Image (cartoon, rainbow, N blue to C red):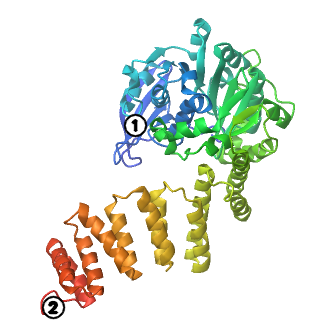
Amino acid sequence: RWVWPAVPLSVNRDEQAYEVTFYREGLAGTVAVLQNRDTPDERLMSIDGVIIGESRGGVDEKQRMLAHLPFLLRPAEANQRIYTIGLGTGILAGELVQQPGGAEVVCVELSPGVIEGARLFADLNWNIHDHPRATIVVGDGIQYLRQNRGLFDAIVSDAKSRPGHIGNVAFHSTDFYSLCRNRLTPDGLMVQWVSLETPGRELRTILHTFVRSFPHGHVGIAPPDSLYLIGANQPLQIAADHIQQHLEGPHSANLREYGWRDACDILGLLAADGQTVTDWLVGDEPLNSLQWPVLEFQSLDIFRKSAVVRKQENLASLVQLMETRPTSVQVETENVALLEDCRRSAELLLEATKLLGEERIEEALARLDEGLPLATRHTRFRELAAEVYFDQAAAARQANDATSALYYYRKVAQALDKENISGHWQLAVLFHQLGALNESAGEYYTALQGDPQNVDLRLEFAYLLATMQRNAQSARQFQRVLDSHPDQPRAHLGLGLVLYAQNRGLLARRHLTQAVKLDPTLQDVLTQSGIQLRGPE
């Protein structure tokens, strides 16, 4: 059982929060859709007990990235006809049809049960079954390419890409890659995802096979879980401004949720080209083909190592891959220095991820400290840095080391993206608890810039300003709440207390009286403050 443990998805109410909402047995596999009983928006699709799609998480992220890569790397008008293998939840195909440019999408799915089950994800896949520019075909994805001679501007493959899956030999073979290359338009792209959990020797075989099959092959590294393979018949020419415009568009909202917000994130992803991969290989990796299917007949002993260990070993090896700069990727940008910063911060992100997995925390922190000044626009780097710094601050607080905690919270503040409202809010509370009131106020202010209508956030900010005796500013914040929520008792209370401190007794009592009318329990606050609502002015 250590070779490949089968852990089926449990649907027992006592063991899991999921219930089966769809179930079909078929020749291509048993398809199930499961829904979380407590949070119905959380849904999973599985084939033979293996999760192949979900409404939120790692599978969802890589499917959305696969859909966006052709549009990130080329103008939308260059993607008029797209072919994708494997429907799954339909999220990938749905993301393709909603991109600008009005592309026609052909999706081939082997299992009728998957096609039927994907209807339960219609709210996430843009109702792909009934979309006028989408064609869903029941069949084998490779056979379809053999039988249909038409050309595609992009081919997206998300089929059989987990370690140990039957069929990997076909979808990572010279035969398949050559077929895809011949079905691409002259400037077309093929993209494919590969898991970093793939055993090291298999991973090298896959990369070797891929870059040998395309005139221009590229490898994108997205730690801690993913590789993205990009194949083309022409050199890859990309424009940094185009990438940024695409990421800022409304059609990229689902991708931005996962931290892909800046052109630097994508430019840092492009780690290696065919030549750098060839130089990195040991030299004895075979090519995988249908005639010589080495991926189907690897010794099962390679799976004796856990997925975590396999991933760490791959990360350590890929760090070496990034030591050589790719020469075949041409980036159009007016800011060459930014391009260099993106590349270096991507290297440091990979190194830090590897070191964290090996629990070499001090060395990882050194990489993050080095990269943070470079990563002003590298969102993925800053997200990891913020997470690690926050953990260090929490450990320092637990050890009653307030000085170190403040140091790391300040590092978190440097790393946080301005769009991370909850992060800035949480940091504001933590600074307040440690007595760093000015820094707390700064974090509240930053959070409010992103969510100015958040009443609870503005109230906390207003009360903090009152604590700092910045009464005029505090009063303005309370009044802004009352302008939109005139019956907010805590806003009346806070404004009344601030006015009372400013010796504006009559107006203060009006607000305090109104606060108590709206919420009688607030009388206790006034009593503790020594304020009486009745009596002489």
Q: Earlier in the sequence, mark 1 or mark 2?
A: 1
Vertical comparison of 180 with 366: above or below? above
- x and y percentages locating residue 71 in the rendered image: 56, 30
In the image, which disc is placed on residue 34?
Answer: 1
Q: Position of residue 409 (x, y in %)?
A: 57, 69
* Mark 1 surroundings within 10 Å by alpha-carbon count, few (fewer than 14), some (14 through 19), many (20 or more): many
Locate residue 361 relative to residue 95 in the image: left or right: right
202 horizontally vs 465: left or right: right
Instruction: Name the element at disc 1.
Output: strand
**Residue type at numbered disc 1:** Leu
Q: Mark on residue 218?
A: none
**Residue 399 image position (x, y, % from top left):** 59, 78
Nearer to the camera, 32 or 254: 254
Judge whether residue 299 can be spotted in this image: no
Q: State whether residue 515 is above or below residue 103.
A: below
Q: Mark 2 sits on what residue?
A: 537
Q: Is residue 251 visible?
A: yes
Query: Which quadrant is the N terminus positioned in?
Result: top right
Question: Viewer-nearest of labels 1 and 2?
Answer: 2
| Residue that appears at 51% across and 56% down | 418
Q: Position of residue 382 (x, y in %)?
A: 60, 55
> Tag 2: Cα neighbours inside 10 Å, few (<14), some, or many (≥20)?
few
Mark 1 touching mark 2, by CB under 8 A? no
**Which picture quadrant has residue 509?**
bottom left
- Find the distance from the CA under tag 1 to the CA under tag 2: 65 Å
Residue type pointed to by label 2: Glu
Q: Give whichever of 311, 183 is nearer the camera.
A: 183
Residue appearing at x 39%, y 76% in the figure: 465
Which quadrant would the C terminus be assigned to in this image?
Answer: bottom left
